[in-house]
Image (cartoon, rainbow, N blue to C red):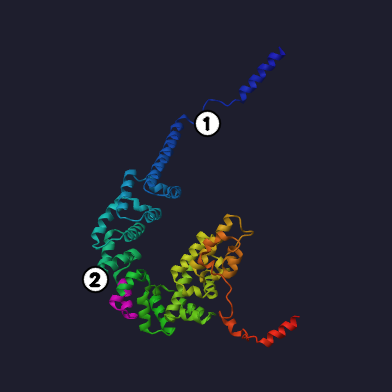
């Protein structure tokens, strides 16, 4: 009996601990279950749409590495679009013959260009601009600008009417829209004031202004009072005449893009250079103005690669030969340093000679030798940029090429010609050799007596 009572009491206590199945105020209503199902269905539908959009973009050449970030960043906008309209928009973009990488960049930066109505409007708008030639680069620039600032083709047409009234040809107008589409946000008076300063304030001929806008259309975005006038006044204060300033600007309109005081800083560097006379003559061979602008171009390039302006000026001061080399050569060297040799751009501050040596005759052959030895485990310790560039040709040959005959094919024709040159010209020893005197019979007799 005691056992039965104990069993009934335990069962009753377990029943009291079980949760009630009847609904109460804290329990979930059955009416909320379909709402959860709708949310899940909506989420699944969005997921399917994302997959469809990703497949569509991937089919038209968009790299897989960009799709995830692009979809997550523009998810709300893309899900509101019809998949067929999006495919039609991409087809219209391809008719503009925009290069694949630029097209991908355009869509990633301005996804609004996928709007079918927007593209239909501009597909007709480009034909109404009246330009003899519409380049893919101009189309890309115009679409990006109009998408960001919601400008229709009528705004571009009005700007072209103003520029045509000033006498500019279609090639220049196309370049202006490509390089500086922001001109459409300017009123007529601002455009005329900038063009008028170029003609009268510098002064430059009408043909010269046409060439300036064709080569450097960004000049239309510079103010006259706060930028162009002070810049020309600085050139004059440095001792340059109006004719020279006009000549140099017509030669390279990018001069108008210099900041105030920038050319003066470049001249300070040139005056403080300590280099051979031959290098100085090459630097100033085209005049002081051009020499200062060449310094500015190199400083800007090294800053774009990751150096500060102070570091860029320091690099040019340590290696003045970099001012003599063309920009294409410097760009090739830096690209090889970063992408092929896998060195950081700041290594140039420790080994500035790298930008001053010959690329084909010194940099490439030496790196090929080191790379081959590294692949064969022939190097006892890592070879840095200093050990690669600093040694003389003979020293590098004796260290890395001579012990390994298979490296001769990498080192090129300099391998067999590496010899220590004599300080004296060939054949000079014959002059200092004592003249021989013919031996007489008496001399022979004395030599025999001496030997006996």
- Image mark for residue 198: none
Q: Main secondary structure of the magenta part?
A: helix
Q: Residue at x 57, y 60 (%)?
A: 405
Which x, y percent locates residue 156? Answer: 28, 62
Residue situated furthest top in the rendering? 1
Query: What SS does tag 1 mark?
Result: loop
Q: Quadrant of residue 127?
A: bottom left
* Quadrant of the drawing holding the N terminus: top right
- CA gap, disc 2 and disc 1: 77 Å
For label 1, the residue is 27
**Measured along the vertical axis of the image, is residue 215 above or below residue 371?**
below
Does the segment drawn in magenta span residue 199?
Answer: yes
For label 2, the residue is 165
Residue sitting nearer the eye, 308 or 145: 308
Q: Which residues are magenta?
A: 190-208
Q: Residue at x 29, y 65 (%)?
A: 174
Residue sitting nearer the eye, 338 or 366: 366
Mark 1 residue crowding within 10 angstroms, few (<14) / some (14–19) / many (20+): few
Q: Residue at x 36, y 48 (%)?
A: 60
Q: Earlier in the sequence, mark 2 or mark 1?
A: 1
84 left or right, relative to 325: left
Residue 115 visible in this rendered orientation of the protein:
yes
Residue sitting nearer the eye, 452 or 306: 452
Which x, y percent locates residue 294? Answer: 44, 75
Does the segment drawn in magenta span residue 399?
Answer: no
Residue 306 visible in this rendered orientation of the protein:
no
């Amino acid at each position: 009996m005691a056992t039965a009572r104990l069993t009934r009491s335990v069962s009753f206590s377990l029943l009291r601990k079980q949760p009630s199945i009847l609904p109460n105020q804290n329990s979930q209503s059955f009416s909320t279950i379909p709402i959860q199902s709708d949310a899940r269905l909506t989420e699944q539908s969005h997921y399917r749409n994302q997959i469809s959009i990703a497949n569509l973009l991937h089919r038209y050449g968009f790299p897989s590495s960009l799709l995830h970030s692009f979809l997550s960043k523009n998810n709300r906008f893309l899900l509101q679009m019809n998949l067929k309209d999006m495919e039609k928009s991409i087809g219209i973009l391809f008719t503009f013959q925009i290069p694949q990488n630029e097209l991908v960049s355009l869509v990633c930066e301005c996804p609004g260009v996928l709007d079918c109505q927007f593209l239909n409007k501009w597909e007709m708008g480009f034909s109404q601009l009246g330009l003899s030639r519409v380049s893919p680069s101009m189309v890309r620039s115009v679409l990006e600008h109009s998408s960001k600032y919601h400008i229709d083709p009528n705004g571009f047409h009005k700007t072209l009417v103003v520029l045509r009234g000033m006498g500019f040809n279609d090639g220049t107008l196309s370049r202006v829209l490509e390089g500086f589409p922001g001109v459409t946000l300017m009123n007529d008076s601002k455009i005329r004031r900038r063009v008028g300063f170029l003609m009268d304030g510098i002064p430059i001929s009408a043909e010269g202004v046409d060439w300036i806008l064709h080569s450097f259309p960004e000049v239309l975005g510079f103010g006259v009072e706060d930028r162009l006038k002070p810049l020309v006044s600085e050139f004059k204060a440095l001792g340059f005449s109006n004719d020279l300033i006009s000549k140099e600007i017509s030669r390279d309109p990018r001069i108008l893009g210099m900041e105030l005081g920038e050319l003066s800083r470049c001249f300070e560097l040139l005056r403080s250079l300590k280099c051979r006379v031959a290098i100085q003559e090459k630097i100033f061979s085209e005049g002081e103005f051009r020499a200062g602008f060449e310094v500015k171009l190199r400083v800007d390039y090294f800053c774009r690669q990751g150096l500060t302006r102070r570091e860029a000026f320091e690099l040019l001061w340590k290696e003045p030969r970099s001012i003599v080399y063309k920009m294409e050569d410097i760009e090739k060297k830096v690209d090889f340093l970063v992408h092929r040799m896998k060195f950081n751009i700041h290594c140039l501050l420790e080994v500035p000679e790298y930008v001053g040596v010959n690329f084909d005759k010194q940099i490439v052959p030496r790196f090929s030798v080191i790379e081959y030895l590294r692949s064969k485990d022939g190097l006892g310790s890592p070879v840095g940029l200093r050990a690669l560039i600093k040694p003389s040709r003979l020293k590098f040959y004796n260290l890395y090429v001579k012990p390994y005959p298979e490296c001769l094919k990498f080192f090129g024709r300099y391998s067999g010609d590496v010899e220590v040159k004599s300080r004296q010209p060939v054949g000079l020893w014959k002059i200092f050799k004592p003249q021989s005197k013919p031996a007489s019979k008496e001399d022979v007799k004395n030599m025999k007596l001496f030997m006996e």
